[in-house]
Amino acid sequence: MTHSLHRAGGFQNLKEDFVVLSMSAKTVNSRGSAKKMKRFFEILERYGPVNYGDMKTGNKFNISRDRIFIEIQDTSILHFVYTDIETVEKVFKELQKADLGLSVVVSGLIGPINEQCSKVGLQMHTVEVSGGIHGKTGMLPGKSILEITTMCGHSMVASRLVEDMIKAIKKRKITLKEASVELAKPCQCGIFNPKRAEYLLGRILDATNPF
Amino acid sequence: MLIDGESCVGCGSCVPYCPVEAIVLHEGHRNKKQKTYAYINPDDCVECSVCVRASVCPTDAIEEQELEWPRILRKAFSDPLYVHQGTDVPGRGTEEMKTNDVTGRYADGWIGIGMEFGRPGIGTRFRDVDKATRKLTELGVVLEPLNPMTQLIENEKTGELKSEILDEKVLSAIVECVIPADRITTVLTEILRLSDKIETVFSLDLICKVGPDGHIPLLQELNLSGLGCSINGKVNLGLGRPVFAGEPKKE
């Protein structure tokens, strides 16, 4: 379950894409953790996430905030998406203060995450990186589509849907923002970043605009 | 998943939502009339439920079916809301490094490796996953027991998966192991050789504990092996505790 690891992209657009998640360890500290998970949720929602969700219920575009919150369980996995590292730093500080005892993982550019950790007196405990995609890579869609679809690590956002949205925007049937939200819906965990999708879709459209 | 051809009006709204392009539009006879209708190819469908959850069908013609073994594995490894029975974890069923500050799964001097077959967005048959479980077992690598893929191995000595699951197609499945850091080059070389022997893609995950001085030993190993790695990744902040303070220890 490394669903936020392989987000494709360059430094410039990944610097606006951070996922913060928390879960309990099933065999160790899961029992009774729902209360702490709810506290985690309350803290993180205050910092203006562009998406959030629980793997037990779904994301903010499909399920109401209250239902996600009420249905948090010991085995929940909560995700929140932010678009800048400064906000993530504030989240770090508050989580340190709250001392919930739950595991917290941040996905994004490792350099800036490390810097913010140092600033608030945290040290990275474990790191996971991507060693790339191997095998029949000719089957993959183009890089610009992958930058969007890999924001859902479980591959719930189809490359064909991205192409469909691009066509709909071109025909003015839908706005960039609406298309980005539509793409965020299938990603049940709520780790898809609609703001970044808006930027990436715009970039694709600019590149294909003859004028 | 199934589309009721009688109710379907052939609008095609569901078609782009399918991550594995299993939905196609057909021309044919339904209710004695020539019509266009959508059809889900059962061999390609991975039971992820994206089509039905998209709520775009104007006639609610998309139906979820009761799934039996081994087809239920399609849902287990494709729908992230499905909780794996063997690990009690949704998604692809493994906690990997996310709880390492609590579980200690990856200790100093060890490196975690994950091969995510079918990711991103292509899907995989277990037949290809089987090639990896057998190769790693042949290399003497112990596969992670708290991973649902390991729990599908039929023969621990050879790493062979249960024969009846090999043709099942899923969105992705993770083969996971932990090895001593000094074996990384050997194991990665063999893993990369599998690239030519599979009919899909795999994304490679590499995990290590950060040293007390902030040093990431894995990065040095990857540079030496020539593989390199991404500039982004996942960081466990070390905020977890094995047992919550003031609470009784789990028996």
Image (spheres, coloured by chain):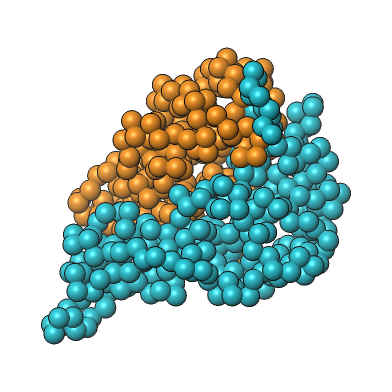
B50 with respect to B35 (left or right) = right
Number of disc labels? 0
Q: Quadrant of the C terminus of chain B?
A: top right
Q: Residue at x 50, y 38 (%)?
A: A76
Q: Residue at x 66, y 24 (%)?
A: B248
Q: Residue at x 47, y 60 (%)?
A: B75
Instruction: Note whether residue A39 is visible.
Output: yes
Residue nearest the observer in this picture, B58 or A16: B58
Residue nearest the observer in this picture, B94 or B219: B94
Which residue lies most toward the right here? B182
- Residue B183 picture location, percent across and down: 84, 53
- Residue B133 picture location, percent across and down: 71, 65
Q: Residue at x 48, y 64 (%)?
A: B72
Q: Quadrant of the N terminus of chain B?
A: bottom left
What chain is colored cyan? B
A97 with respect to B23 (left or right) = right
Vertical arrangement, residue A37 with respect to residue B42, above or below: above
| Rendering colour (chain A) | orange
